[in-house]
Image: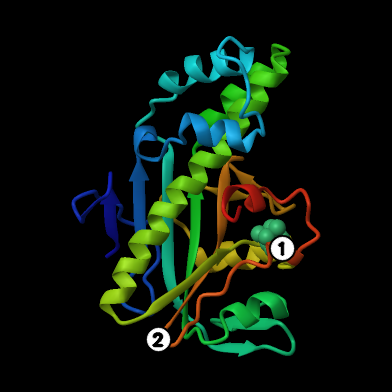
Amino acid sequence: MQNIIKNGKESNSVPLQGLGVDSPLGGEGIFYHFTFSEVAPTFAEILDFIKSTNLEEEHPAIVFIKEVLPQLNLDTGISGYYILKNLEELRLKDGLICIENIEFNLGRQLCGYIKEATQVALFVCTAGEYFTQLTNRLNEQGDIMEAYILDAIGSLTVEKAMDKIQESLKIKMLEKKLKISNRYSPGYCNWPLSDQQNLFQLIGENPTGIALSDSCLMTPRKSVSGLIGLGKNLKLHEYGCKICNNTTCIYRRILHE
Ligand code: SF4
């Protein structure tokens, strides 16, 4: 039986039979659903993300954001899920972890960040298909600036949803006297994107509807996946963004600046 959290409230009333996976830690797969208003980025966050904080009120970008935000007031599509797994092995020197006999090439940096972990939460989260459809439509119409801004809003939305899920996980784990790490995703922080296949295999069927292609890209496009370490003695490490040479990383802007 998995728990359901809808609009911030936990409930077991939504029938999701056949979805989710029984966790070895006692059925701890948890599904979250958000309305856009619960996780919407602020005006200032959007402008900061697109590096346009000094625009005049009548600038087309400002006009578009004012127009589009109310239209995004969706109550479907924004969702997330995590499942807890035991961390069977962590080989710091090799930069490897093992969960249910599946190896992940996390790299030494991330292994070091979660080296005291005894469990992990494997997560997926999406802002939904609507963002992709609307962005594609704007691109087809030649509205490139608008498409770019909408794409940015989608990125911020999924990260804000994931912030809420991470905070909820933190509170739940505190009850068990477990600390949690930051969240890490394949394709970032020297963790190969190819590990997405293993990640999705372990997460299994889940109610978010996020799918993975053979080339490890997620559908809907505005989706994230990854892991969070859990452990009694876990120490929280800062992301290594200051010494990382990945200049195009969106997380540098969203999470760590
Ligand atoms: S910029 Fe930060 S989050 Fe992005 S890959 Fe580098 S260390 Fe990781």
**Secondary element type, mark 2:** loop
What x and y, as percent, mark residue 117?
50, 83
Disc marking residue 185: none
Image position, residue 163 (x, y; %): 44, 53
Name the secondary structure under disc 1: helix
Q: Quadrant of the N terminus?
A: bottom left
- Left-right relation of 187 to 27: right
Relative vertical location of residue 228 with respect to residue 124 in this rendering, above or below: below
Task: Name the quadrant where ligand 1 sits.
Answer: bottom right
The percent coordinates of residue 16 (x first, y second) are: 30, 52
Residue 21 vertical position relative to residue 129 in the rendered view, above or below: below
Q: Amino acid at mark 2?
A: Lys
Beta carbon of the mark 1 residue lies under 8 A of ligand 1: no
Tag 2 or tag 1, which sits nearer the N-term?
A: 2
Q: Decide if ligand 1 comes within 8 Å of the CB at mark 2.
A: no
Q: Amino acid at mark 1?
A: Lys
Say if residue 97 shows up in the picture.
yes
- Residue 170: x percent and y percent? 36, 68
Where on the picture, by quarter, is residue 12?
Answer: bottom left
Q: Residues within 10 Å of mark 1 (few under 14, many from 20)?
A: few
Which residue: 51% across, 48% down?
Answer: 159
Q: Can you say whether 34 is above or below 42 in the image?
A: below
Given residues 48 and 161, the one toward you in this image is 48
Most foreground residue, 242 or 20: 242
Q: Which residue is mark 1?
A: 242
Instruction: Give the image quarter of residue 39.
Output: top left
Foreground of the two, 174 or 54: 54
**Residue at image location 40% in from the left, 77% down from the top:** 179
Q: Between marks 1 and 2, how big is the CA–CA gap?
A: 28 Å
* Residue highlighted by disc 2: 232
43 to the left or right of 14: right
Q: Nearer the viewer, mark 1 or mark 2?
A: 1
